Image: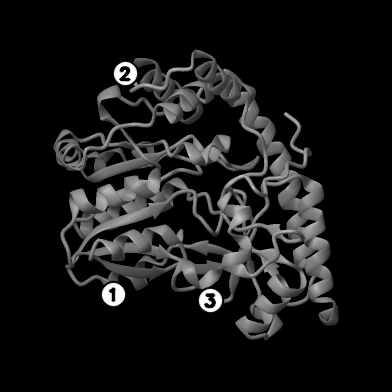
Amino acid sequence: MNFDERIDRRGTHSVKWDMMEKIYGVPAATGIAMWVADMEFRPPACVQAAVESMAAHGVYGYYGDERDYLDAIRWWMTHRHGWEVPAESIFTVHGLVNGTALCVEAFTQPGDGIVLMTPVYHAFARVIRAAGREVVECRLAQENGRYVMDFAAWEAQMTGRERMLILCSPHNPGGRVWTVEELRQVAEFCTRHDLILVSDEIHHDLVYPGQHHTVMPLAAPEIADRLVMLTAGTKTFNIAGAHAGNVIIPDPALRARFAARVAALGISPNSFGLFMVTAAYSAAGAEWVDTLMRYLDGNRRLFDERIDAIPGLRSMPLEATYLAWVDFSGTGMTTEEILRRVEGQARIAANHGPTFGAGGETFLRFNIAAPRAQVSEALDRLTEAFADLQ
């Protein structure tokens, strides 16, 4: 578990590195990719061993008998989250963007409104609009530099056309770990407005010391009849390319509706992803995650300290995820000037805040899941790029 190892991913068909110049204009040879949400670390040895075992066998046929895979998911959720998951409630999908899209198709109709608490993960709005549904942007408020839910304002936005709310828990890009009380308020809001609640908890293992994530079924068990859970090991163990995620649905009636949509689209799992996740959801995987979070805790402390030392910049304190959310509004600069300095001068590719919806206009999102020396180099470049403010 050497998280300080520098791994050159250029020329490996990495979207994060090999598409950086085309999308952001940041040169491939000298740029630093801090946008796509995958890590610069090797996965746990148990995952690598599972892939090597597949390669040694040398036959890559259809995957059958999912008992080991389902048992691994259930073990992980019980031991890491205190959540007992029946095997029959688990569907496997090709990643959670695919899972989100399937939920939109299964539980809403064209023209329906789907509520997002913005700014939030940009793929949600993309799949909602592509499916012909309406994105209802309910802006998060800020208190003491962190996001909070503003239910009073959101009540006034509801028209009766809304059919679903997609929750990001923990929150991406703000890094909030929602409290049990906040989660209960979300559940009550969904009940009042008769909304299906899709809780995307892909980051629920990536929580920093001193924080505690509560899965929605434990926070509000009374809404099981309208709850859909999205979970995956792909972010946790840096195996996003496996495209393996789970849609977990407690209610039999909702399960039947979702199963019908999956059947209509002919979806079946990717064997590589299932073998990898089965290996990862284990005691060895748990030890790796604990070590990872201690390392990332050092990265976030370094990043926040250095960013907050630049006048006009403020990094929202992370409670979970490895995705730092930096507000540039204090510089008084235009978006064009900020990007000229970050992308042109510092040669760093970071996600543009407006893609996360209302409230993200003055932000950039930086991926800090990288060797500390690389994070430090990026911070040196940003400090130099804004040196005239200091």
The CA distance from mark 1 to mark 2 is: 49 Å
The residue singled out by tag 3 in the image is 361
Q: Residue at x 84, y 71 (%)?
A: 384
Is residue 387 rendered to the left or right of residue 44?
A: right
Is residue 27 rendered to the left or right of residue 160?
A: right
From the image, state whether disc 1 or disc 2 is nearer to you: 2
Label 3: few (<14), some or many (≥20) within 10 Å? some
Say which of 265 and 200 sits in front.
265
- The image's mark for residue 156 is 1
Q: Amino acid at mark 2?
A: Gly
Q: Residue at x 81, y 55 (%)?
A: 376
Q: Residue at x 76, y 44 (%)?
A: 371
Answer yes or no: is residue 144 visible. Answer: no
User: Tag 1, which secondary structure?
Assistant: helix
User: Tag 3, which secondary structure?
Assistant: loop
Label 1: few (<14), some or many (≥20) within 10 Å? few
Dot 2 or dot 3: first in sequence order is: 2
Q: Position of residue 41 (x, y in %)?
A: 67, 38
The CA distance from mark 2 to mark 3 is: 47 Å
Contact (Cβ within 8 Å) of mark 3 with mark 1: no
Q: Compared with residue 22, is residue 330 higher up or lower down, i.e. above or below?
A: below
Q: Amino acid at mark 3?
A: Glu
Q: Compared with residue 353, is residue 332 higher up or lower down, i.e. above or below?
A: below
The residue singled out by tag 2 in the image is 64
Q: Amino acid at mark 1?
A: Ala
